[in-house]
Structure formats: structure tokens, C-alpha cells
Image (cartoon, grey):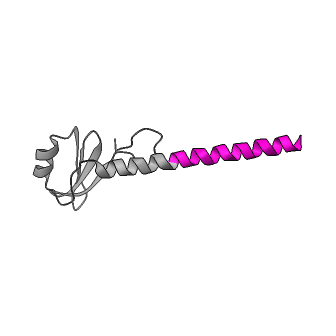
Amino acid sequence: MQKLLTTLLILLMSLSVVTISNAEVLLIERVEQSQATDRPKRASTMNQVRNQFGEPSRVVSAIGEPPITQWVYSNFTVYFENQYVINTVMHQANADEKGPKPLN
């Protein structure tokens, strides 16, 4: 009986290692995919972003000082300080993915 329990325990531990390995591969693939995705570059102007990517689906008005504006596109959100891109953040691929959530 104890041999059977030990074997089951080893089997369960093996499966959990395989599951963790697969999750890491998926995370690595997601990071590589986001790096290859065309998105606005830092220091681009609002006009350059609009010309390259079109109109955003939503604009979050400027907040704070210096004013920070958000333009939301389908795959990413662009953050501007005054008229210049300071960052672009990819959206979550699915609800289970860990990472920042867009503001509502």
C-alpha cells in the first residue's frame, strides 16, 4: 500500500512539473509575440501614432501634471505625456494571463 502511495505521489509531482514547464513556455511565447508586435515607439507624437495606427477605440482624457493621456487600441494602450508617447502596454491575451488590467 505504501509503495502504491509513493508511486502515486511521484506521478503527481511529475505531472505538476510538466504543467509548470508548459506554462513557462506559453509565457515566453507571449513575451516574444508582444516584442514582435508593431506598436507605437517611445517619443512618437500623437499625430504619428494616429497616422500609423488610426483612431483609437477610446481616449482617456489627460490626468495629472504633467498631463498623461491614454489611447486604447484593440491590442495595446498608448500612454502620452503631453503630445509624446512615454509607454505602450500590451493588453492581456486572455482573462487568466497575469499582468496589468486596462483602466475602465
Percent x, y of residue 12: 70, 43
Q: Please identify the quadrant where the C terminus is shown.
A: top left
Residue at 25%, 50% (x, y): give it.
78
Q: Position of residue 8 (x, y in %)?
A: 77, 41
* Viewer-proximal residue among 87 and 40: 40
**Of residues 86 and 13, the one drawn nearer to the viewer in this rendering:** 13
* Residue 16 sits inside the magenta stretch: yes
Q: Nearer the viewer, residue 41 or 18?
A: 18
Residue 23 visible somewhere in the drawing? yes
- Residue 29 location, x and y as percent? 41, 48
Q: Quadrant of residue 81?
A: bottom left
Q: How many marks?
A: 0
Q: State left or right for residue 84 relative to residue 99.
A: left
User: Residue sitting at 46 percent across and 45 percent down?
Assistant: 26
Is residue 98 something that shows in the picture? no
Residue 63 placement, left or right of 19: left
Most frequent secondary structure within the magenta stretch: helix
Q: Which residues are magenta?
A: 1-23
